[in-house]
Image: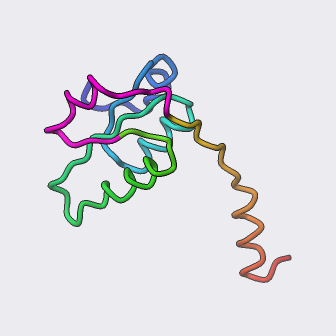
Amino acid sequence: FRFKESLAEELRSADLVISHAGAGSCLETLEEGKPLLVVINEELMNNHQLELAKQLHRDGHVLYCNCSTLVETLQSMDLSTLKPFPPGQPEKFALFLDKVVGFE
């Protein structure tokens, strides 16, 4: 499909998600608890997706590759090595923000 308001239904039923390294796509997939293979678009300016993919990989949450290594990665990947992504804690940010602006 070309456009869809939400991919939540597809994410819930997926066994594996293959995605670009957009922050929203990565976080939504990881929060759903699904294994994620990130394919880097090396032609983006400053290749900012690589930075996110590398950090999520270092933390053990995703596997990543580029277009030329996608097939090889799919054939050799071990999804059992991935760690669950910890749930968000927005209340911590709210407390920090309150402190910064003097609302505590």
- Side of 73 relative to 25 (left or right): left
Q: Residue at x 52, y 37 (%)?
A: 30
Q: Nearer the viewer, residue 51 or 100?
A: 51
Residue 66: percent from left, percent from top? 21, 43
Q: Residue at x 34, y 47 (%)?
A: 21
Task: Say if 4 sits above or below 96 in the image.
Answer: above
Indicate the quadrant containing the N terminus: top left, top right, bottom left or bottom right: top left
Indicate the quadrant containing the C terminus: top left, top right, bottom left or bottom right: bottom right
Question: Which of the colour schemes (rainbow, by chain, secondary structure, one colour) is used?
Answer: rainbow
Task: Label the magenta part by its dominant secondary structure.
Answer: helix
Q: Is residue 20 magenta?
A: no
Residue 13: percent from left, percent from top? 48, 16
- Side of 5 relative to 30 (left or right): left
Residue 55: percent from left, percent from top? 44, 55
Q: Residue at x 13, y 38 (%)?
A: 68
Q: Is residue 78 magenta?
A: yes
Span highlighted in magenta in the image: 64-81
Please identify the quarter of the rendering in which residue 71 is found. Answer: top left
- Side of 100 relative to 45 (left or right): right
Task: Say if 95 sits above or below 26 in the image.
Answer: below
| Image label count | 0
Q: Residue at x 18, y 37 (%)?
A: 69
